[in-house]
Amino acid sequence: MDLGLRDRVAIVGGSSRGVGKAVAVALAREGACLTISARTESDLRKTEIEIARSSSQQHVFAVKADLSVPDEIKRVVRNTFNRFGRIDVLVNNLGPPPMSRPSEAGDQQWNDAMENNFMSVVRMCREVIPFMKQQQWGRIINILAAEIKQPEHGTALSTSSRLAVAGYAKSLANELASFNITVNNVLPGLVLTERVNALFQEEGLRSGKGGEEVMKRAIATVPMRRAGKPEELGDLIAFLTSDRAGYITGANVQMDGGLLQCTM
């Protein structure tokens, strides 16, 4: 299926590995021009080479940056526009804060979580929206987590800061709808990435049960009895950035194998 993304210009945050990389690869496969960004130079360059092999070098632009820093955000957006002459798609994908109990996290931890997860999204959106308004077309996708509907133990900082993003996104979607700009959140559940594998191994060492057993128990809670693939998430987001999803905005789109049992 041709999603009509050829020569659209996308910025994908946190795109050197994991789900961010899968999103970038999916958009590149559809012919989009990409700015990929992450903090680790070596991983970012490997992803740039991989994407360039599947498209062409002029269609992928790697910018090392920390997207929790306001000046770095402005630099990524400015360099993207200077390189490609437009910005059509923004995919916000930031890492979660540290684990913490809600009653024990200090003020600085809460401030850091809101600064890194919430304010980074606000700032990225604020920078790209003028370009999208000018061309009367745009797509903003925030990768959050199914935990915002069903919090897990120790995820208070992550859940709260991502819930703030969900509220902001709904308000922003209403504001921008008349400009043909959509704003949506994607809520992945258990998606098997290198980071998730590492977390299973760490939990296995702590509990003495082993990483494989911890993984099996987690997968057993999913009605589909398997973990999601990063490529599946990439394909979903590619669809949401296309004209075919032009009437979807202000939505929280779950991709969790049926894990969440909410009826509304």
Image (cartoon, grey):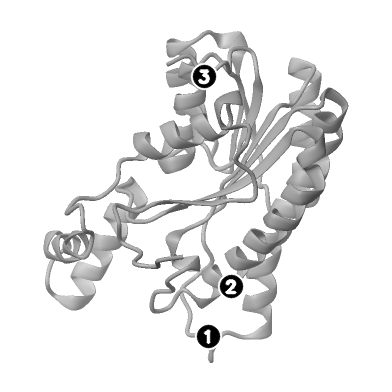
Q: Residue at x 81, y 20 (%)?
A: 82
Between marks 3 and 2 in the image, the one whose residue lies nearer the viewer: 3
Q: Looking at this view, is 168 or 26 the one in front?
A: 168
Question: In this figure, which residue is indicated by the disc labeled 1?
Answer: 102
Q: Is residue 26 left or right of residue 258?
A: right
Disc 1 from disc 3: Cα separation: 42 Å
Q: Residue at (14%, 60%) from the top-left corner?
A: 216
Residue 98 in the image: above or below residue 26: below
Q: Which residue is mark 3?
A: 3
Tags 2 and 1 touching, CB below 8 Å: yes
Q: Is residue 86 left or right of residue 107?
A: right
Q: Where is residue 187 shown, x and y percent of the image?
A: 47, 54
Identified at 19% across, 68% down, the residue is 204
Residue bearing mark 2: 160
Mark 1 neighbour class, 10 Å CA radius: few under 14, some 14 to 19, many 20 or more: some
Q: Residue at 46%, 17% (x, y): give it.
A: 29
Is any atom of residue 69 visible in this view? Answer: no
Q: Amino acid at mark 3?
A: Leu
For the N terminus, which image quadrant?
top left
Q: Of the residues shown, which amino acid type is indicated by label 1?
A: Pro
Badge 1 marks a residue whose secondary structure is loop
| Horizontal relation, residue 129 to residue 91: left or right | right
Secondary structure of residue under mark 2: helix
Q: Secondary structure at mark 3?
A: loop
In this rendering, the label closer to the viewer, 1 or 3: 3
Between 153 and 264, the one nearer to me in the picture: 264
Q: Estimate the x, y position of residue 250 in percent, counting from the top left.
A: 64, 50
Task: Return the disc, 3 or 2, that comes first in the chain's sequence.
Answer: 3
